[in-house]
Amino acid sequence: MRKFLLLLLSLVLLGPLGIDLYLPVIPGIAKGLGTPESLIQSTIPLFILVMGVGQLLTGPLVDYFGRRPMALAGVALYGLGAAMAALAQLPAVFLCSRVLQGLAVCCTTVALFSCVRDRLNGDDAARAFSFLNGTLNIVPALAPLAGGLLAEWFGWRAPFWALTAYALVVLALIARGLPETRPGNTLRRLGLPVNAYLAILGQRRFRVFSLVNTGAMAMALTYVSLSSQVLMGVAHLTPLQFSLAFGANGGWIMLVSVIANRVIRKAGRPACLAIGTLLMGLGSLTLLTSVAWTPLIWQTHWLSYMLPVAIACSGLAFLLGPAASYALEPYPDQAGVAAALNGFVQMAGAAAISLAFIALPLPPRLSLSLVMLLGAVFAGLARLHTRRLSGRLTSLPR
């Protein structure tokens, strides 16, 4: 099982690597392509949005063709997109490369979530999801620094060549070691399963728990999108200091995720949801206090932003695993479709919430505090809903 989870981890890292590795070199990319920096920054929510919407299409394919073939196709497509970005001479080509990589991550994400759902259930599935979501935080811990150093030594295209190389390595690992986990009773059909999607969305349990991950991801995306503006623009950190602060938070989430796994084992998923709700709410309150009731010298200090973020990210570590397992648990015969819809709600919803709050005429930290509060509300409602669960399976339209 450990080897199986490590293979899935190599897949789950593709998404955050596709964002975090080039964060410190966004100005260099804009300069190299002769385009406004804002256009390159927009590729972050674009990447997330494509990941969300594309999963509606890849979910049925994962059930029809199998987990392993779709994972292999996704990794190959990811490497192609990374190479396209590295070779781009025009902004339009760079944008297309990000769309291609977003579509690739759709395939790998649905495949790996389906693999977990095929093999594990209940608290075991929650621990696996928590492990995968927690361990991937090694990417924000190290990727910005690595991307900055690669760009410093070899230019802004180097991080994308590194992504190409990583995709080739993962492709070899998956081809050699990932088994096919699709159950024999999986419903297989081509085309968009609109009736199945509507049936899943009609289940209150699915809506409640998928919104937990939506709120948590919206908080993380808003934090990432605003971090360079707040930490380098307001707090005047250098790119290296920014990478270290960003990376320290990623390391912190990894540590909290280990604790969250133990809490799941000892106290169960409802306890994790309760803890995550409190931490997300506390992060919002702390950030709001730093905006409204602290001296200006503290408001412009980088810790006034990163400490509340660290608190809220601790809540994220407690929420993602249990919420995903609760949302997908009732759908054993269409795990790909359910995982795809969950990914769509999570990614597209998070991108929409993040973009909406960033667009508000509010200070960046206030916008982030409101997103944290929304995440706490979603998590609190889910914790209340756990008292009504009976554990039955859900039959979907065929």
Image (spheres, helix red, strand yellow):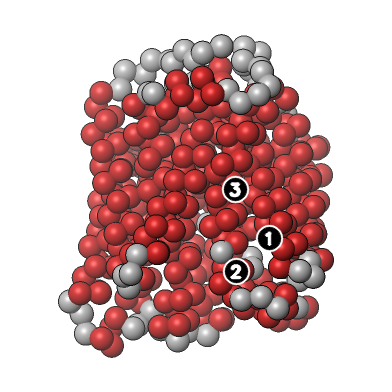
Label 3: state its secondary structure: helix
Q: Which of 327 and 3 is in front in this view?
A: 327
Mark 2: amino acid: Leu
Check disc 1 and report the residue beneath it: 95
Q: Name the residue under label 3.
A: 50
Mark 1–mark 2 Cα distance, whole angstroms, equals 9 Å
The residue that appears at 36% across and 18% down in the rendered structure is 391
Judge from the rendering whether residue 136 lies leftward or rightward of residue 350; answer left or right. right
The residue lying toward the viewer, choosing from 250 and 61, is 61
Quick check: 28 above or below 115?
below
Judged from the image, the secondary structure of the residue bearing numbered disc 1 is helix
Q: Earlier in the sequence, mark 3 or mark 2?
A: 2
Q: Can residue 67 be seen in this snapshot?
A: yes
Local packing at callout 1 (Cα closer than 10 Å; few below 14, some 14-19, many 20+) is: some
Where is residue 132 shown, x and y percent of the image?
A: 54, 45
4 and 52: which is toward the camera: 52
Choose the circle earlier in sequence order: 1 or 3. 3
**What amino acid is at disc 3?**
Val
Q: Residue furthest left?
A: 293
Give the numbered dot on residue 151: none
Query: Residue drawn 56% across and 17% down?
Result: 333
Which quarter of the image is occupied by the C terminus? top right
Q: In this view, does 384 lie to the left or right of 216?
A: left
Mark in front: 3 vs 2: 2
Q: Mark 2 points at which residue?
A: 39
Q: Position of residue 194 (x, y in %)?
A: 54, 24
Residue 258 spot, x, y in % from top left: 45, 49
Give the SS element for disc 2: helix
In percent of width and height, residue 153 lies at: 75, 81
